[in-house]
Image (cartoon, rainbow, N blue to C red):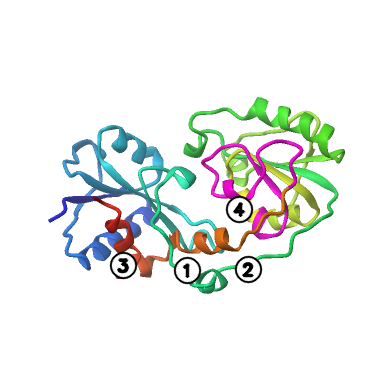
Amino acid sequence: MMDFTVLSSHRAEHQLSHQKAMIEGLKHHGIVAKKSFSEAHINTKYVACWGWRVGSLLRAKGHEVLVMERGYIGDRFKYSSLGWNGLNGRASFPEYPDDGGKRFSQISFLHPWKKDGKYTLIMGQVPGDQALGGRDLASWYKEMADQALNKYLLPVVFRQHPEAKKKGFRQFPKGTLPSKGTLNRALENAAIVITYNSNAAVDAVINGVPALSMDRGSMAWDVTGHEVGDRLYPEREKWAHSLAWKQWTIAEITSGIPLKPLLDMIP
């Protein structure tokens, strides 16, 4: 029998609910997983946990880590992603079934590509977020703003991540104008969106706004440009349909359905 531990924080309600769902889901595949609230004494080869902050520590110790995180499309608090040994674009996911976009259409839809717009939009990220791998983006924002002004000949707008604001960060890159309002409002008049590896690139492409991603950890890497000056309009259907198979509801995880292809990836 596969030795498996499901790790959770005592204090985080979303982690506790995912721990419970994962343990129940694994039971459908004959796996009786251990419950743990500390990474210090885990002695199983396989571990499921929330987020890469703890996941990276477990991986460094030699564990095979199934990472649970927020989803990518639709209501990201309703769906959770499941991938092995990495975060977002650096995780390993199973092959998805070709359902002609049925699952995707139940979650979201693709807007037509936009060919106009009033400004270049740079998306901020939360300092210290695990997706950044320790990188400080302060100078990068300024570099992107300078290059964008030169290449696209449009005003440059910067949207600070709402969580960064909540944590007390105040980011005002020189040469940019502040974005106000919701993400969808910011995307409405954007001609091009620039991200490091933010999920905002996914939002942009879904909404028909061409985007750049500068790190392979981006879930939109395959459908975005990677140099300032790019403005790409690639085929998006296959990419979008696959995203829908990389995120799951609590009920689905509890049922064990999404876990079978993940378990089948194990040699």
Is 251 situated left or right of 240 in this image? left
Sequence order check, earlier mark of 2 and 4: 2
Quarter assignment of residue 239: bottom right
Q: Which mark is residue 109?
A: 2
Q: Which residues are magenta?
A: 204-231
Q: Secondary structure at mark 1?
A: loop
Label 3 – label 4 distance at C-alpha: 27 Å
Q: Position of residue 95 (x, y in %)?
A: 41, 59
Q: Determine whether label 2 and label 1 are within 8 Å by CB.
A: no
Rounded to the nearest angstrom, the CA distance separating label 4 from label 1 is 20 Å
| Element marked by disc 2 | loop
Disc number at residue 254? 3
- Residue type indicated by callout 3: Thr
Q: Spatial distance from mark 2 to mark 4, Cα to Cα?
A: 12 Å
**Mark 3 / mark 2, whichever is N-terminal:** 2
Residue 202 image label: 4
Identify whether 151 is placed above or below 161.
above
Frontmost of labels 1 and 3 is 1
| Magenta residues, dominant SS class | loop
First of labels 4, 1 by sequence position: 1
Residue type pointed to by label 1: Asp
Tag 3–tag 4 contact (CB < 8 Å): no
Q: Position of residue 137 (x, y in %)?
A: 61, 30
Q: Residue under circle 1? A: 98
Q: Amino acid at mark 2?
A: Phe
Callout 4 amino acid: Val
